[in-house]
Image (cartoon, rainbow, N blue to C red):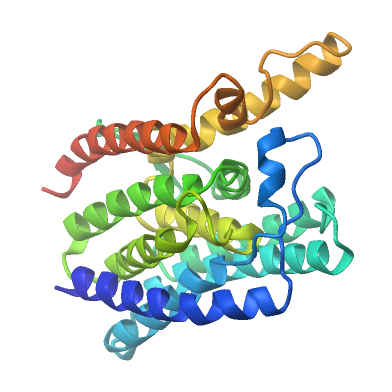
Amino acid sequence: MTAWLAFLVSFLLTLVLGYFILQELRKLHAGQEIRADGPTWHAKKAGTPTMGGIMFILGTVAAVIALGLPYMRKGIYVHFHILLVAVAFGLIGFIDDFQKIRHHRNEGLTARQKFILQLAESVLFLTIMRHEGFLKNTLYVPGTEISISLNWYVYLIFAAFVMVGCVNAVNLTDGVDGLASSVTLVVMAFFTAVAWAWDGDGARVLVPAALAGGIAAFLVYNCHPARVFMGDTGSLFLGGAVAALAFALDMPLVLIPVGIIYIAETMSDIIQVGYFKLTHGKRVFKMAPLHHHLELSGWSEWKVVGVFSGITAVCSLLAYVAVRGRYG
């Protein structure tokens, strides 16, 4: 009941707030600057309002806080910690988006600035979760009964870089109308199911269920042709939520199958840049990340979103079957 209620409250709030936020973003001329080296047909998207991630952030925050109060009165704050780290990453994205809009260019914070801020937030979250007793310095291998014990400081370094990598991978995936939204909606469905298996109506189910509702409502505005983009505000918030949930549920390695699209997008970018430098100008892909390569190969935006979401759904289902036995 808690999961469904969180989903519905967030969905309705995001849907209603989204209408008014979209109008305000248009009044503020918060238009997206399109990459000059991107697909030529993306040029017509220039000026589409960005920072739309505010819609599902507000819907999710309101639902989690309202429905999470009974847990906090009992001294349970795990849902609040997950939400807080997602909001913190979203704030970095907001600053980045604001800089882009203010200076009318497709660059905001530098890569170095974003990395330092993201790394600091990851370390803080992981330290708090360990202090609260929600995080162990062991790595559970999905589908097995194996848990690898690590020195806490080794685990902290590993976990912090996994979080930063996950956040930026979700950000890279946000390049086609509705892509990051659709893929992450499936991922949130997975985490909702796992959290439910973990402790039923417990606090852990609130964030993924509420965020699933918020994303579903956001897709009303973000599906092709998009009337608004989530911007870094939204994509970094989503990345923070995905990473935080993986650690809060003590299964960071599950990000490999569940986040297969995020990984593929990131690896395509790394391979493209590395090969370009090594060969002094040659490319593996027509354009990176992967979704742009497929677009230039003739795929429509609808097809990219459908296939990527379908792959995520299949991998998430297999991952759920693999970890389900852990909870009896």
**Quadrant of residue 118 in the image?**
bottom right
**Residue 107: horizontal and vertical position, in percent?**
82, 53
Q: Is residue 67 above or below residue 125?
A: below
Q: As drawn, which residue projects farthest toward the bottom?
A: 73
Q: Is residue 112 above or below residue 63?
A: above
Q: Residue at x 56, y 72 (%)?
A: 54
**Quadrant of residue 140 in the image?**
top left
**Residue 232: horizontal and vertical position, in percent?**
65, 58
Q: Is residue 305 above or below residue 65?
A: above
Foreground of the two, 99 or 22:
22
Q: Is residue 18 above or below residue 199?
A: below
203 sits to left or right of 199: right
Quadrant of image for the N terminus: bottom left
Foreground of the two, 13 or 61:
13
**Residue 133: horizontal and vertical position, in percent?**
40, 66
Q: How many marks?
A: 0
Q: Residue at x 63, y 46 (%)?
A: 168
Foreground of the two, 134 or 71:
71
**Residue 92: horizontal and vertical position, in percent?**
70, 65
Residue 158 visible in the shown view: no
Q: Residue at x 46, y 49 (%)?
A: 137
Residue 19 visible in the shown view: yes
**Quadrant of residue 155 in the image?**
top right
308 sits to left or right of 55: left
317 sits to left or right of 261: left
